[in-house]
Image: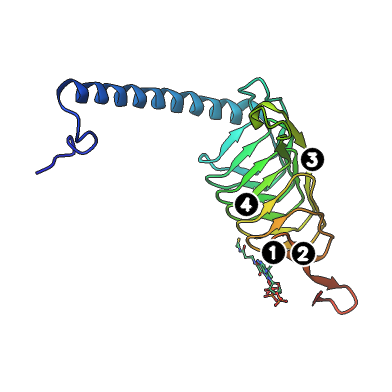
Amino acid sequence: MKTAWHIPYPTLGGMGRVCAVAEAALGLIRDMVKAIYLGMIQVCTRLFYVDRALPSSISLAARLDVIPRARNHERHKLCLGKNSLIETSSVICTWHGDVILKDGASVGIGTIVIGPVVVGENSACSQNCFISGQSHLYQDVSKNFLRQGFKTGQVVIGRNVWVGSNSVILPGVKIGDNSVIGAGSTVVDDIPAYSVAAGNPARVVKRHDPKTGQWARV
Ligand SMILES: CC(C)(COP(=O)(O)OP(=O)(O)OC[C@H]1O[C@@H](n2cnc3c(N)ncnc32)[C@H](O)[C@@H]1OP(=O)(O)O)[C@@H](O)C(=O)NCCC(=O)NCCS
């Protein structure tokens, strides 16, 4: 019968197995040290680096990349208005620009927000969205894209906007007040106020008609 001990290194015997286990143990120790270090960074971030009105809520399982950790990271703000919410497993990164959640704004489970991004009053980004105000430069093919710098374009999500699950919002995009982005959309251009936009690339599919008070298909 095979034991768990045999499973990882079935072809190694004697010294080979000892070395492999020693390597795995060192790797595990490294991962644990890193986890403790990153955990301490999260504690410091929440204590000293978030400009936050109360009540507001940040899941302990959210990752806040606010403190610069590399040469190309800059110090920017993470600001949370009253009743704003950052849900579990979401990631907020301000290394390239501010992230501002206005009063009542929320970031859903698993959503990634890379500044510069503003989310307006009472707007909701649903689950697993990707909202980025930053993009890598890639023009020089002789260099890795990570070494070519980046460009930014602030994403501005207006008031009372609902961004459906799994949507992608690219740098520089502005979404007007009271609009809806359909689930799974990729928003590459600005979306006017009082519109429903959906698809890849997202196109306006409905507009609110103030005369009838109804949403009309476009
Ligand atoms: C955007 C949304 C709100 C629109 O709902 P609706 O007003 O009932 O829209 P309709 O079903 O009338 O669709 C209108 C048109 O848009 C298209 N459409 C709607 N949602 C779409 C989407 N997510 N992606 C692509 N096309 C979409 C429809 O196919 C339809 O096209 P047609 O005119 O060619 O037939 C809804 O489709 C949606 O995506 N909801 C998000 C759900 C979600 O993320 N929930 C998270 C909970 S927190």
Q: Is residue 104 above or below residue 100?
A: below
The mark nearer the N terminus, 2 or 3, is 3
Q: Are marks 2 and 3 in contact (CB under 8 Å)?
A: no
Checking the image for residue 180, the label placed there is none
* Identity of the residue furthest to the bottom in this view: 212
Where disc 4 sits, the SS reads loop
Dot 2 amino acid type? Arg
The amino acid on which the numbered mark 4 sits, given as a three-letter code, is Cys
Where's ligand 1: which quadrant?
A: bottom right
Sooner in the amino-acid sequence: mark 4 or mark 2: 4
Q: Which residue is mark 4?
A: 129
The residue at label 1 has a CB less than 8 Å from ligand 1 = yes
Question: What sort of colour scheme is used for the picture?
Answer: rainbow
User: Which residue is drawn at the image coordinates 26% and 25% (left, top)?
Assistant: 20
Residue beneath label 1, please? 199
What is the C-alpha distance between the residues marked 1 and 4? Answer: 14 Å
Q: Are marks 2 and 1 in contact (CB under 8 Å)?
A: yes
Observer-side mark, 1 or 4, equals 1
- Where is mark 3, residue-wise? 153
